[in-house]
Amino acid sequence: MEADDLAEIRAHLLRVRDEVLAESERAYAASQSLGKDGVPDIGDMSSNSYNQQVLMSLSETQRSRVRDIDAALERMDKGVYGLCMRCEEEIPARRMEVRPFSRYCVDCKAEVEKFGE
Ligand SMILES: [Zn+2]
């Protein structure tokens, strides 16, 4: 995979990750402001525990999305992004475009779904 493509995919993944986190942050802030004047009072919370609470409030789908993105970014850092984790063949670019978090080629994906990882 070309370095330019990788940089583009990385930027895209980071953007999606930010969107998921921002979305859940809004949901969390909204849940905190219930019964108040509509302005969430998060000033006295340490940002660390705030972040943890936000993560806790992620839905299972959002959490697995963030996990997939983190895993994809990690594979980029290791230089194995776009390679099948099972047969180590390069995953076709078209498949990576459709599912940028893909860890397996189509054949291995089918096997993994049938027999487990
Ligand atoms: Zn494979």
Image (tube, grey):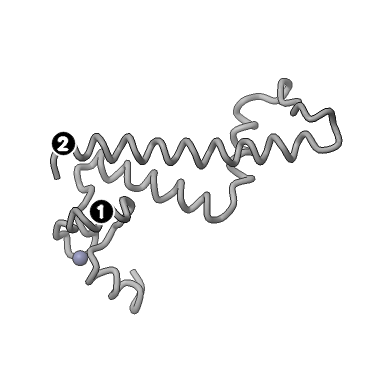
In the image, residue 78 lies at what x, y percent? 23, 42
Residue at which label 2 appears? 3
Say few, some or many: other residues with alpha carbon within 10 Å of mark 1 (under 14 / 14 to 19 / 20 or more). some
In the rendering, which numbered label is found on residue 1? none
Amino acid type for the residue under numbered disc 1: Met
Q: Tell me: 33 left or right of 68.
A: right
Task: Give 3 or 112, whichever is nearer the viewer.
Answer: 3
Q: What label does residue 96 carry, if any?
A: 1
Element type at mark 2: helix
Q: Quadrant of residue 14?
A: top left
Q: What's the residue at 19%, 58% (across, down)?
A: 91
**Residue 116 image point, x, y percent:** 36, 73
Dot 2, how many residues are within 10 Å of its Cα: few (below 14), some (14-19), or many (20+)? few
**In the image as oriented, which residue stretches furthest toward the right?**
35
The kind of secondary structure element at disc 1 is: helix
Which quadrant would the N terminus be assigned to in this image?
A: top left
Q: Is residue 113 above or below residue 13?
A: below
